[in-house]
Amino acid sequence: MVYDGILAETVRFDGHGGDEIPGYLARPLGDGPSGGVVVIHHMPGYDWSTKEIARRFATEGYAALCPNLHHREAPDAEPGAAAAAVREAGGVPDDRCVGDVAGAARVLRARPTSNGRVGVIGYCSGGRQALLVACQLPFDAAVDCYGGRVIAAPEDLSDRQPVAPIDLTAGLTCPLLGLFGGKDRNPSPEHVATLAEALRSHGKAFEFHSYPDAGHAFFSVDRPSYSVEAAADGWARILDWFGRHLAA
């Protein structure tokens, strides 16, 4: 019988600029070696549903760490209020996101049972951020789950988010899996096709899959947008992707 226990807990680690930030770490209770996954939360925040995703990865044999990207704006607030404060401030600064995710990846690679391979996954705004960081940091695999605003008009850019992630795709150094809803408007099917063409033009390794009957946030079990069929197939594709690229 294989023992499949996990341990999940709040940890603190050094993020962007050496700031200490909290994160949620879930890991299998085994001898390893195992790969790691940085889980980037959606805009609703560092919430129970994202922590459940981290726990799911732990049950599948990965150490998963979700950094709280909203900590600085509202360190003691509940996830919804913290997300509102971040929206009011203009979103998570891209450079800070890269620094925080880099810190999370360092934690995962430093674990004694790590096999040295780390991937990143994000949902909604976190999907955009997963692509953003994968184009600037040395990951072994990345997954973008319906990341919006990957393509941005000049008027949509800001001091906090000065570059559209699609303009950074030449820097992508790991295979990318993209999962999208055919009825989503952000990203729209047209934006997904444009991103695919950009990746193709740079010779990047990627696989995109769209679910024609799904909209945005089809993984979110607590929302009307949840799609059983799309989420089940999406999870199978994610686990296959990380199995291919992060396994010992």
Image (cartoon, rainbow, N blue to C red):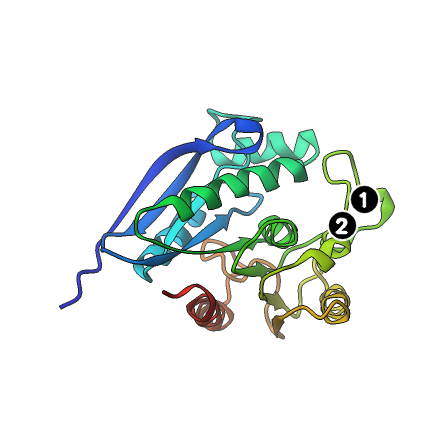
Crowding near the residue tagged with mark 1, few <14, some 14–19, many ≥20 C-alpha atoms within 10 Å: few
The residue under the point 33% across, 55% down is: 58
Residue sticking out furthest to the right: 154
The residue under the point 66% across, 59% down is: 172
The residue under the point 32% across, 60% down is: 61
The kind of secondary structure element at disc 2 is loop
N-term mark: 2 or 1: 1
Q: Can I make out residue 45 in this image? A: no
Picture coordinates of residue 179, whole percent (x, y): 58, 66
Picture coordinates of residue 215, whole percent (x, y): 62, 64
The answer to whether 100 appears left or right of 90 in the picture is left
The kind of secondary structure element at disc 1 is helix
The answer to whether 174 appears left or right of 171 in the picture is left
Picture coordinates of residue 18, whole percent (x, y): 53, 27
Q: Is residue 11 above or below residue 180?
A: above
Badge 1 is on which residue?
156
Please state which amino acid type lies under the numbered disc 1. Asp
Image quadrant containing the N terminus: bottom left
Picture coordinates of residue 161, whole percent (x, y): 73, 40
- Which picture quadrant has residue 214? bottom right
Work out whether residue 116 or residue 49 is closer to the camera in this orientation and state it.
116
Image quadrant containing the C terminus: bottom left
Badge 2 is on which residue?
164
Q: Is residue 165 above or below residue 202?
A: above
Residue sticking out furthest to the left: 1
Pointers 2 and 1 in contact (C-beta within 8 Å):
yes
